[in-house]
Image (spheres, rainbow, N blue to C red):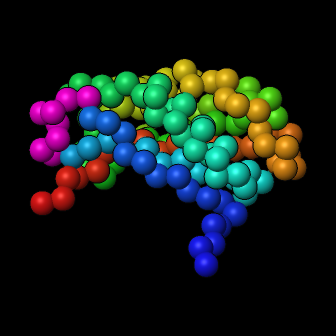
Amino acid sequence: MLRIPKTAVVVLALALASGALAASGSPQLQTYFQGSVDSPAYQQQAFQRVAKAWKQPGPKGTPAPGKKTIVQAVLDKDGKLVSTAILTESGSKAWDAAALAAVKKAAPFPPLPKSTSTATVEAHFHFAWVSSPG
């Protein structure tokens, strides 16, 4: 039986903006919600909104492999973006700015599931540059 933890994780790879970058790595987005949002469907919707809003900076804006930006977003029950903050910087100002812009552009998010017991929830969006296998 598959068990989904309270803080579920949605992991999907973002599409590459440039074929030239494929040889060295690829962008990856991971989304983490606080425990009160237990709807995988809602988490997937939020992930897809941010992934769609993502605009990868050019090769000079790509961080070193393994580096990532973590953007914290606080959402209210209506899905309004209450606040954002960069919790972890990647070492690339362009990458960090693109990550923050993607979260802001994705707003407003869908209303939180009715089962959510808190007035606001915290979500973390991890934008990483991962090495290609090989």
Start-end of magenta stretch? 17-24
Q: What is the total number of numbered labels drawn onto the structure image?
A: 0
Q: Quadrant of residue 91?
A: top left
Task: Please tell me which residue is depicted at 76% across the width and 33% down the height of the picture.
Answer: 111
- Residue 49 occupies quadrant: top right
Q: What is the x, y in percent for residue 92?
A: 32, 34
Residue at image coords 46%, 52%: 11
**Is 110 within the magenta?**
no
Q: List x then y, in percent, for residue 35.
A: 73, 57
Whether residue 91 is visible to the viewer of this picture, yes or no, is no
In which quadrant will I find the N terminus? bottom right
Q: Is residue 63 above or below residue 57?
A: below
Membership of 18 in magenta stretch? yes
Which residue sits furthest top? 105
Residue 99 in percent (x, y) is at 45, 31
Q: Residue at x 60, y 37 (%)?
A: 46
- Residue 77 appears left or right of 13: right
Q: Would residue 8 appear left or right of 27 to someone viewing this image?
A: right
Work out which residue is located at the far bottom of the displayed protein and give it: 1
Q: Nearer the viewer, residue 115 or 58?
A: 115
Check the image and report above or below for 8 versus 1: above
With respect to residue 116, does 74 lie above or below? above
Q: Main secondary structure of the magenta part?
A: helix
Q: Please tell me which residue is depicted at 32% across the width and 36% down the height of the picture.
A: 15
Left/right placement of residue 107 relative to residue 58 reads: right
Question: Could you tell me which quadrant the C terminus lies in?
Answer: bottom left
Q: Position of residue 43 (x, y in %)?
A: 62, 46
